[in-house]
Amino acid sequence: MPAEPSQSFHASTIVSLLAERVEQAAEQPAIHFRSGGGWKTLGWREVADDVRRAAAVLVHLGVEPGDRVMQFSPNRYEWIMADLAIQIARAVHVPVHASLAPAQIAYQIADSGAKLVLVAGAEQAAKLLEYYDGHRNELPAGTRFLSFDPCPEVSDRVACLRDLALHADESLGERLMRDARDRVSPDGLATILYTSGTTGEPKGVMLCQRNLASNALGTLEAFQSEPDDLRLAWLPMSHIFARTCDVYTWVAGGGQLALAEGPDTVTAFCRDLHPTLINGVPYFFEKVQRYLVDNGLADQPGILPLAFGGRMRAACSGGAPLPDHVAHFYNERGVFLGQGYGLTESSPVITAATPRAMKIGTSGRPIPGVEVNIAPDGEILTRGPHVMLGYWNKPAATAEALRDGWLYTGDLGEIDAEGYLKITGRKKELIVTAAGKKAVPNHLESLLKADPLIEQAVVIGDGRSYLTALIVPNRDALAAELRRQGHEIAWPEALHHPAVLSLYDERIKARLACVSQYEQVGRFTLLDRPLSIDHGEMTLTLKLRRDAIYRNFADTIEAMYR
């Protein structure tokens, strides 16, 4: 059974946690990030000053309580500053994944009704403005753009936050901080995060202050934060995993946070900073393992702790299932690695393995304040202060996910006699790659099948490092296209002919140009027969039976990952 939540789980807000942290540790170092080729360190007072100035700029630009403010930027210090400033201004933060295509971002701007869009710099500004100019009727009238870095080529359309902050009204910023601490409700909407829906249309998950603060506090209690903790953060903060488990646990628990640009910089940063905590996805931890094994270093005494700086007390994996062999590799070599489980809709942490309670092959126990149950059909249910308010503008989807106070996760699992949760499957049809990226296969398949040369398509990639596809060509359309191009290629030789493979590669890339990089198909195979009811690969209503397809084409699928 989960621990009984304390009052703090129900009453706190992120803005109050920030105010308390600044009061308690104003002069202590808070954050480290790369700047000008070296490390820059700011204390809590400096962070708070930057947040107040940014909040004053937002209000000066017309942002009012309840307005949605979108942020389209990769990880950087200003991302965190803007997130906290949006909350201080009592607005609603709508973060966008930096890898999304302009059309996908435009959908989220329109759906959320964002009043202001924050971008990192000229690259993001140009990407959005080009699309905006051609699709003005799709976006809210009067949407404004603000950049962290100067955008000289479009400065008349995109103001620079850095320049505006130099002249910000300091007294306004201080008043906004006081008002936010006193007036922001734990039940107030703090953020909308868009996540893939089963139809490919994103759903905006609404999380309130109570959701975020309670989950950060529960995670801290589970891991018992220490005064000298230094968290190394590299996961995209537009995802709730990094935002809660890196940023908000840092605000709530104190200690220090260091920002790495991406996975390739982590081990170098570990050598520089000697962190004590790191969150990651299975693909990252497996990549470190493969490097040590391939270079004959895996069993060298102390090599794995040294790779993480020598002070690592907890490494946590989430976003996708952690292979048991990876967990054994780390824990047998002196680096604790456990996995957790959660959803965007649960803020996100539901269960987590900790150094005090871990069983390899499970996702740990519920964190304090969180309750977990298993429905009769095996679906995992959870309730508590971490459960979302609902989906933005989607009452039917909200009613399906939230029933009688429980969040229906769509995942299948079991709870053993000691209270550990084991994930056994997924009810909802969603691919989660080894990097924790989510893709909706039937949405991608519908895009592919829009091409006249593609009769059927099956997108694969759950737990893998990239997506692949089984493609059934439309033989008649293919033959006509080959004749048009002057080729005389007979069937089935066409399935392996370089000209045909090049043609399909171009068509697939063209059809998927509107989706993000991690939704692209890395490799594909042309099949010599259609998927059929007779082979058990389709239902009577012609829906794909994926398990049967995976079994029937197991060797073909594995060949695409070799």
Image (spheres, rainbow, N blue to C red):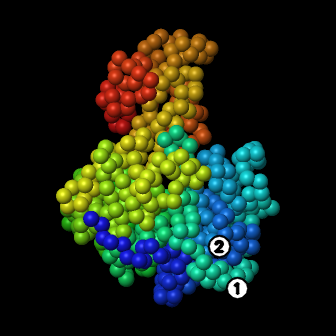
Q: In the image as oriented, which residue stretches furthest toward the right?
A: 156
Residue 146, image x and y in percent?
70, 64
Residue 227, image x and y in percent?
37, 83
Towards the viewer: 37 or 545:
545
Neighbor class of circle 1 (other Cα within 10 Å; few <14, some 14-19, many 20+) is few
Residue 130, image x and y in percent?
73, 48
Residue at 50 percent of width and 32 percent of height:
445
Q: Which is nearer the N-term, disc 1 or disc 2?
A: 2
Residue 255, quarter of the rendered image: bottom left
Towards the viewer: 273 or 549:
549
Residue at 43 percent of width and 15 percent of height:
493
**SS class of the residue under badge 1?**
helix
Q: Report the side of 319 relative to 103 (left or right).
A: left
**Image quarter of the N terminus:** bottom left
Q: Nearer the viewer, mark 1 or mark 2?
A: 2
- Whether 265 is drawn above or below 457: the answer is below
Mark seen at residue 189? none
- The amino acid at mark 2 is Ala
Residue 485, image x and y in percent?
61, 16
Q: Is residue 150 visible?
A: no
Towards the viewer: 76 or 401:
401
User: Which residue does the numbered mark 2 point to in the structure image?
Assistant: 89
Residue 54, quarter of the rendered image: bottom right
User: Which residue does the numbered mark 1 point to in the structure image?
Assistant: 171
**Image quarter of the C terminus:** top left
**SS class of the residue under badge 2?**
loop
- Whether 49 is drawn above or below 358: the answer is below
Residue at 37 percent of width and 81 percent of height:
228
Residue at 34 percent of width and 51 percent of height:
380
